[in-house]
Image (cartoon, rainbow, N blue to C red):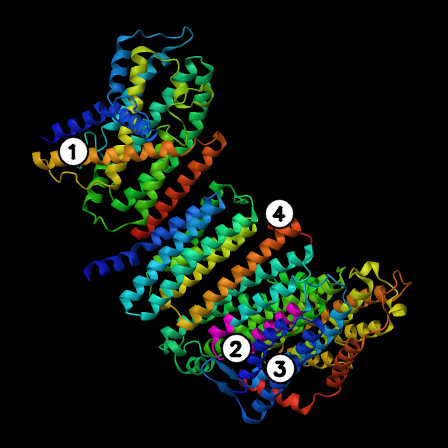
Amino acid sequence: MRLALNVFQWLLLILAAPLAHGIIAQAKARLQRRRGASIWRPYADIAKLFRKEDLVPPSASWVFRVTPLVLFGAMASAAAFVPVVQGSALLASRGDFFLFVYLLALGRFFLSLGAMDGGCAFGGMGASREALISSLAEAPLLLGLVAVAILASHADIAGMVGWTLQQNFFKISAVHILAFLSLGMAVLAETGRMPVDNPTTHLELTMIHEGMVLEYSGPSLALVEWASAIKLHAMLALLIALFAPWGMAPHVSAAPLLVALLVYFVKVGALMALLAVIESSVAKLRMYLVPGFIGVASAMSALAVIFATLVKR
Amino acid sequence: MGLVEIAAGKVLSSFSAFLFLTILLLAVARRISTCVLLFSLQSAIIAAEVFAVGFQERLAEAYVVGALVFLIKVVAIPYAFFRLMERLKTVREVKAATTPTQSAFIAVAMIFLSYAAVHSYGQSVHVPADALAAAVALILTGAFLMVSCRKALMQMLGLLVMENGIFLAALVTTFGMPLVIEIGVFFDVLMGLLLMGIFAFRIRDTFEHLDVSRLRRLRG
Amino acid sequence: MILLLPLVIALLAPALILTLRDPRAATRAAMFAGGLEAVSLFAIVWQVHTHGALEAGRYFRADGLSSIFLFNIAFISSLVLVYASGYLSHTGEGRFSSPRWFYALVFLFLFTMISVCLSADLGLMWIMMEGTTLASALLVGFYNTKGAVEAGWKYLVVCTVGIAFALFGTIVLYLAAFKAGMNPAAALDWVSLMDAVSRKGFDPHLLKLAFVFVMVGYGTKIGLVPMHSWLPDAHAEAPTPISALLSAVLLNCAVYALLRYVAIVSRGVGPAFPHTLLLIFGLASMMAAGLLILVQRNLKRLMAYSSIEHMGIIAVGLGLGSPLALFGALLHIFNHSVVKSLLFFSAGNVRQNFDTLRMESISGMAQTLPQTSAALVIGCVAIAGLPPFSLFVSEFAILSAAFSEGHYLVAGIFLAVLSIVLGGLAHHLFHLLGGEPKRLPARAKLSPSEYTVMGIAALCLLFFGARIPYLFDALLNQAAAVLR
């Protein structure tokens, strides 16, 4: 029963991912007083892309061909660690948040290599920028998770979620505030959202993530787009699970699970609306200011770790 | 009233977390108006703390002091700052000597230092370590703002943050000093700010800029 | 009630002065008020001497220690006010925004300083100490030139930060009193604190922490190194009467405030800790100021550094701790203020005549300004500590106390710095007075007011150098008794 539930959670994260992109786009459109595309549009796009032909640059090697598969595989595996409606996940194990972070890193690594392999100038530029941002953003991502892990005395994400579920909602802890803020900023940097990167830009010189995927087409592009959607969805689900998990089902039975599912949709919807508001209100940072932005996140996460150790002493 | 009691207890136990957040944000903020708003927020948190202490310890004086803190530091002083910035027509950026990342890490180091300092005096004073550490961190942050920011307005703000820290230290250790002294201290702070404002105008008129690090004619 | 009289006069005088439009009427009102002020202060001193400590309400008190400082304020402020009337009348149009505001601010400044010396409550003392900074900031920046504005800003910011540290120290002391079980309402009252600290057990860590912060805080106002950065600028750029008030009165008030804390902490944790700190800061001030005197180029800045050096001497005297050293330090406070006023008055005259204070552009003063040169020579000889002037007596007292206590290193540094300062002053003096005159003065003779006050000051130095008047001696002994 638990296995079925975990598989369901995993598939939910993967299959509902394009919907996340669609909802955010729709929210942004509404904020800009446009009607915007339907929230199911990304599904239509992916389906269309699967029907199209896969074009590969003649100078590309096996790295270019294999990148979309590795990327999708890594993101999908990462999604298996995140609890959604109940305090357990498909691949939960001790120390799994390190695995989570490095699966994301694996995907990014291959994406950068594939971009450079494709021979496009913008790909190379995007890859070098991505390397800078991701190497800096790894610190707050890991440290934020470490801070929560120290506080929860659990080394797996599912365990941390379980611990947080038992806490009193009104007991605001400095560690959690700081970790939430720093993880939020790291998520913005990792998933290439504003103010680090503009996902809807059409100016190639300003692209980071979009520049890396310029050369892909057909099913490869579909996989890459889907993988980035899974990454965003999984990280949002991780934020919700770690910092606001109340509403999750305490044990595996039908009614609480349904309630938990509804609560999850509300929460992730709220988070996506927040993301849309942020995207619509801040301007993209110039490239040399991005390390400052991530540096602030690193300082916050370092402080969170210090506080966590102080609390635990 | 149960709800007010819960609120008072909540404020007392978690306000230091928010103060640390304002300290971090003050260190990395890049516009003077952001810093002034953060100061206003900080003072609001401290005013809430004063009210909570007054409620718990049944001190009538605390309500008066809390109202003073709110009126003066949350409303009047930020308003005066914004008016001053308008009339000075000064550049709105905080020209800090350190980049935001460096300032953020310095702020973290200062918070760590304040915990260390409070820990070594912990046996002499029986107060929650968080609150006193927040007070010491505020004092250190004020000093840091005064030293690293080169604009006259930021030095005034740094002084105000230091004053906040000292006030908070008095509050958490002794539930405040006698009322007359508190009022006198407020009055002094206000007059000091008034005079600094006058001098800021004079600096701008005689030097054509407000960058105090460029006031280096008198040396040796 | 007599205690409140000088405060009331000092508050009413600005109101009166500001309502008078005519500058001459304002000046006369100021002189009148200053005379009343001095008389009331002398009356308080006499009362305390004959009848013991006076009190007025919960917050004001005058005892043996305050009477010395009140005497100092009365004497110097009357000299300065008389000098200022002459100085202002000879200053050109447009230099001053208005003599009315000048006198009004001076009286506000006096009000805050007298309140510091009269407060019985440490919190009120802090408030008034901060008040002195606020009242004098506009006076320092009075000329509104670039130098004056910069000096005024630095003065305001550095002193306010320093005083904030002193506030923290006061809070820690309050905490220590609170924890020892004192009644919160009386926990900042000096007399109650002196009484309680010997009976109840105050936490020594807290007392030491409080003293460190108070030392740094009030030490900033005293001008001890390394918190002295505001002093040379402020004293050099302020109008001359204000420089004299700052150097001769304000620094002493700050010493008074520090002394109150030294007394409490010495009773609480023993005299070793506060005295060690005083010695360290005092010697540092002496050494730094003594060396920097050699390289000064501005006359008033030179005198400001000399003030720092002498504050260092006073701190060393207080830090040595023996009755003789204490006597010497308290006497030195008075002597230094007299000679510093004399020096600043001469510098003011130099400024008015040559329109500059840069020593390299002045020479041959002995020929062009004979009277001012005489005053300058008297002042420099006195401040270097040579007999027959009074500073010799006080410095000798401190030095012999150092030797008799066995602080040979302290005495050695003391003597070395004094010699260096003597050499530096002689060098500057020879440059100023000797050689051919480079500039001609605007007016060679001193005006009656200037003549009078400088003469009084010089005579006072000689007189006190010969023998300390019995009355003053009694005052000093009373003050020392309060501290023990």
* Chain letter of disc 2 in the image: C
Pinpoint residue C116: horizontal percent, then vertical percent. 54, 76
Give, as a single range, the part of the protein colored magenta.
C100-127
Q: Earlier in the sequence, mark 3 or mark 2?
A: 3
Q: Are marks 3 and 1 on the same chain?
A: no
Of tags 4 and 1, which is closer to the observer?
A: 4
Choose between A142 and B140: the one closer to the eye.
Answer: B140
Pinpoint residue B52: horizontal percent, then vertical percent. 30, 62
* Outermost bottom residue: C50
- Which quadrant of the structure image shows residue A281? top left
Secondary structure beneath label 2: helix
Real-space CA distance between mark 3 and mark 1, rounded to the nearest whole angstrom: 83 Å
Q: Are marks 2 and 1 on the same chain?
A: no
Whether residues under marks 3 and 4 lie with C-beta atoms below 8 angstroms apart, the answer is no
Residue placed under numbered mark 3 in the picture: C37
Task: Relative to A150, say whether C418 is above or below.
Answer: below
At label 3, the amino acid type is: Glu
Real-space CA distance between mark 3 and mark 2, rounded to the nearest whole angstrom: 24 Å
At label 4, the amino acid type is: His
Secondary structure beneath label 1: helix
Real-space CA distance between mark 2 and mark 4, rounded to the nearest whole angstrom: 42 Å
Real-space CA distance between mark 4 and mark 1, rounded to the nearest whole angstrom: 59 Å
* Chain letter of disc 3 in the image: C
Q: Are marks 3 and 4 on the same chain?
A: no
The numbered disc on residue A261 is 1
